[in-house]
Image: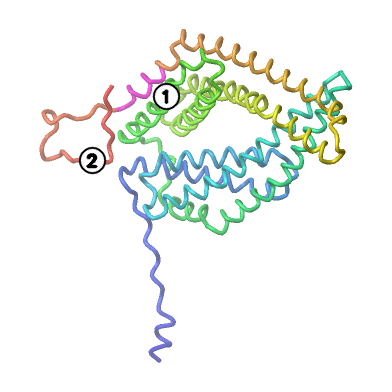
């Protein structure tokens, strides 16, 4: 009888999670995290079916935004889950990124192949397409593995379970939320602008690549916090997107320019191993060299166009206006002289802003 009574005892429901730190940050961050997870999950079936490369693209973007949100709102994440969640999303982003980059490369070479007029260039471009297609087939297994690991980890349902009770779309934004936004965006902006000097060093491909990454991080940070500023971030957000696009185009060209000479050498070795001589190499060399020159010319134009737009942004004081917008939105901190002793409270979650 005792065992029977125990078996029908009602189970205790798990208490709803309490917000960590400022409630305004918790509610806003929870809503952002939930939207990011939903945007990721909706693409899984399409990625698995592999019928359209846009599923990979959208899921990659969603994973990047979720990863960015996890970093920004790390203060509201469960301490025991922080590292695990971030690690799994990072792994997924990496697998999706390699697959997406190869998809973009295949699409580019296909376009150039269709548009090239000299038939001598066709075999070389076709050989590049062949190797890229083979590489893409291998990468699909990595994508499936990352998806399987993500589903086994239950990271997404854990995030949904944790933050669904906390999320709120209220527009009653708290001072600590504005302080957090200022801290994050200002940091990303400073990092981005620190690479400006390298725009005058076009051969410094590594630093221009780092500037692209900084532009991406600035963009994602602004996109996360844009709702609390009405439309005040629209212009700098557009500039960050264009910066990422220009620098991405430059980086893609740099990847090709570094890759193609080695690619030609590997094909020479393959041909020599198969035929015992290198004579068939002459068929693919014109196409490889044509593509190399095409990427070099494209890079030069992209850099010129970016410098032109960059000067215009400087004249318009886009970045200065962004800094002023996020700074002026931060409510002033109460001082000891004006705040009544009986109502003063220490808030360790607040970020003190100094202009």
Secondary structure under tag 2 reads loop
Quadrant assignment, res 242: top right
Outermost residue toward the bottom in this view: 1
Q: Is residue 150 above or below residue 197?
A: below
Residue 189 drawn at (x, y percent): 42, 24
**Distance in Å between CA atoms under marks 2 and 1:** 26 Å
Q: In what quadrant of the picture does the N terminus appear?
A: bottom left
Quadrant assignment, res 256: top right
Magenta residue check for 97: no
Instruction: Please indicate whether residue 66 sits to the left or right of residue 60 in the image.
Output: left
Residue 202 drawn at (x, y percent): 56, 16
Between 286 and 217, the one nearer to me in the picture: 286
Between 283 and 29, the one nearer to me in the picture: 283
Magenta residue check for 326: yes
Q: Which residue is mark 1?
A: 189
Instruction: Please indicate whether residue 277 sits to the left or right of residue 306 in the image.
Output: right
Q: Which residue is mark 2?
A: 347
State the residue at coordinates (77%, 32%): 128
State the residue at coordinates (72%, 42%): 136
Q: Specify few, some or many for label 2: CA neighbours under 10 Å numbering under 14, 14-19, or 20 or more.
A: few
Disc nearest the viewer among 2 and 1? 1
Q: Are marks 2 and 1 in contact (CB under 8 Å)?
A: no
Chief secondary structure of the magenta portion: helix
Secondary structure under tag 1 reads helix
Quadrant assignment, res 203: top right
């Amino acid at each position: 009888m005792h065992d029977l009574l125990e078996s029908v005892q009602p189970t205790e429901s798990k208490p709803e999670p309490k917000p960590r730190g400022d409630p305004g940050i918790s509610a806003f961050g929870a809503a952002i995290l939930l939207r990011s997870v939903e945007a990721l999950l909706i693409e899984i079936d399409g990625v698995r079916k592999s019928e359209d490369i846009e599923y990979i693209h959208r899921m990659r973007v969603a994973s990047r935004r979720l990863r960015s949100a996890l970093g920004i709102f790390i203060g509201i994440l469960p301490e025991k889950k922080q590292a695990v969640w971030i690690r799994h999303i990072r792994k997924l982003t990496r697998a999706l990124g390699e697959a997406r980059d190869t998809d973009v490369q295949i699409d580019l070479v296909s376009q150039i192949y269709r548009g090239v007029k000299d038939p001598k260039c066709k075999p070389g471009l076709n050989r590049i397409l062949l190797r890229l297609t083979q590489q893409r087939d291998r990468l699909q297994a990595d994508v499936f593995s990352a998806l399987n690991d993500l589903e086994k980890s239950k990271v997404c349902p854990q995030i949904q379970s944790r933050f669904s009770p906390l999320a709120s779309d209220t527009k009653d934004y708290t001072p600590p939320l504005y302080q957090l936004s200022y801290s994050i965006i200002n940091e990303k902006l400073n990092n981005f602008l620190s690479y400006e000097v390298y725009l005058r060093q076009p051969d410094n491909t590594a630093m221009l690549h780092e500037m692209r990454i900084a532009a991406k991080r600035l963009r994602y940070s602004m996109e996360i916090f844009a709702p609390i500023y009405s439309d005040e971030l629209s212009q700098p957000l557009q500039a960050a997107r264009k910066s990422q696009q220009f620098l991405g185009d430059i980086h893609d060209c740099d990847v090709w320019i570094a890759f193609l000479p080695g690619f030609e050498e590997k094909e020479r070795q393959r041909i020599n191993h198969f035929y015992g001589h290198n004579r068939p190499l002459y068929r693919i060399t014109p196409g490889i060299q044509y593509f190399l020159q095409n990427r070099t010319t494209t890079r030069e134009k992209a850099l010129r166009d970016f410098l032109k737009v960059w000067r215009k942004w400087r004249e318009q004081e886009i970045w200065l206006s962004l800094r002023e917008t996020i700074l002026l939105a931060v409510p002033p901190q109460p001082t000891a002289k004006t705040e009544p002793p009986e109502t003063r409270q220490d808030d360790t979650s607040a970020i003190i802003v100094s202009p």
